[in-house]
Amino acid sequence: NYRCRSAFKLLEIDSKIKFLRPGLKVLDCGAAPGSWSQVAVKLVNSHGYDSKQPKGLVLSVDKLPIYPIDGAVVLSKCDFTQPDIQDRLVTILKDDKLDVVLSDMAPNATGMREMDHDLITQLAIAVIRFAVTYSKPGADCLIKIWDGRNRPQLEESITRFYSQVKILKPPSSRSHSAELFLLGRGFKGLKSSSSQ
Ligand code: SAM
């Protein structure tokens, strides 16, 4: 039983690209009420129910309350864009890095399309920054946006750091006309000589 229908978007995307596997470490940004995290917990085996498979990690963060999710480490009522919250995420990871970064984060929509697009773009940029700093080479990221004028720039920054960028529109997301998912596959890793 999933906490909301958004679960199906992630299930549809994963059935297509198969990026969540047992043992992976996943960050889920904008996780409340928790259905993406529920999907991730199952697929990466972070609850350890399948003792024959490696155990993953799911880290869930939202500025709204998140009720406990079996198998996930939850940062409830935490704004992902705040440096102290990001520090807490890094502390939980210890010296390890992420295999997959998910963001279904969305700002409160104002109804003004351009402004909403700009607000969600800011969230996407924060996710990309964090992902490139705390991901393992080869990692993937999946970020929801509402389409608009900044999309080429977002695609370009993903292309800079990931081997492949794709735009996904899962069938269950059809009702939100502007909603798209940007997928970066195969994080290239940060070269020590480069500052960004
Ligand atoms: N993927 C979730 C699920 O399946 O249950 C649904 C996510 S919902 C569409 C978007 C979420 O993004 C909201 O819960 C909202 O509070 C969260 N959000 C927006 N801005 C945020 C921020 N700065 N930090 C953390 N969460 C944020």
Image: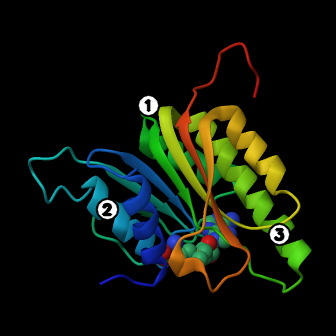
Residue holding disc 1: 95
Tag 3: amino acid? His
Percent position (x, y) of residue 143? 62, 58
Question: Mark 2 or mark 3, which is nearer the start of the sequence?
Answer: 2
Category of crowding for the residue at label 2, using alpha-carbon neighbours closer than 10 angstroms: few (below 14), some (14–19), many (at least 20): many
Question: Mark 2 or mark 1, which is nearer the start of the sequence?
Answer: 2
Q: Which of 61 and 136 lies nearest the eye of the viewer?
A: 136
Marks 3/1: CA–CA distance? 35 Å
Tag 1: amino acid? Asp
The furthest residue to the left: 52
Residue holding disc 2: 41
Q: Is residue 180 visible?
A: yes
Q: Residue at x 9, y 47 (%)?
A: 52
Marks 1/2: CA–CA distance? 21 Å
Q: Residue at x 29, y 48 (%)?
A: 56
Choose top left, top right, bottom left or bottom right for residue 47: bottom left
Checking the image for residue 58, the label placed there is none
- Which mark is nearer the camera, 3 or 1? 3
Secondary-structure class at tag 2 = helix
Q: Residue at x 65, y 18 (%)?
A: 191
Task: Indicate the quadrant containing the N terminus: top left, top right, bottom left or bottom right.
Answer: bottom left
Percent position (x, y) of residue 122? 79, 58
Q: Is residue 82 left or right of residue 114?
A: left
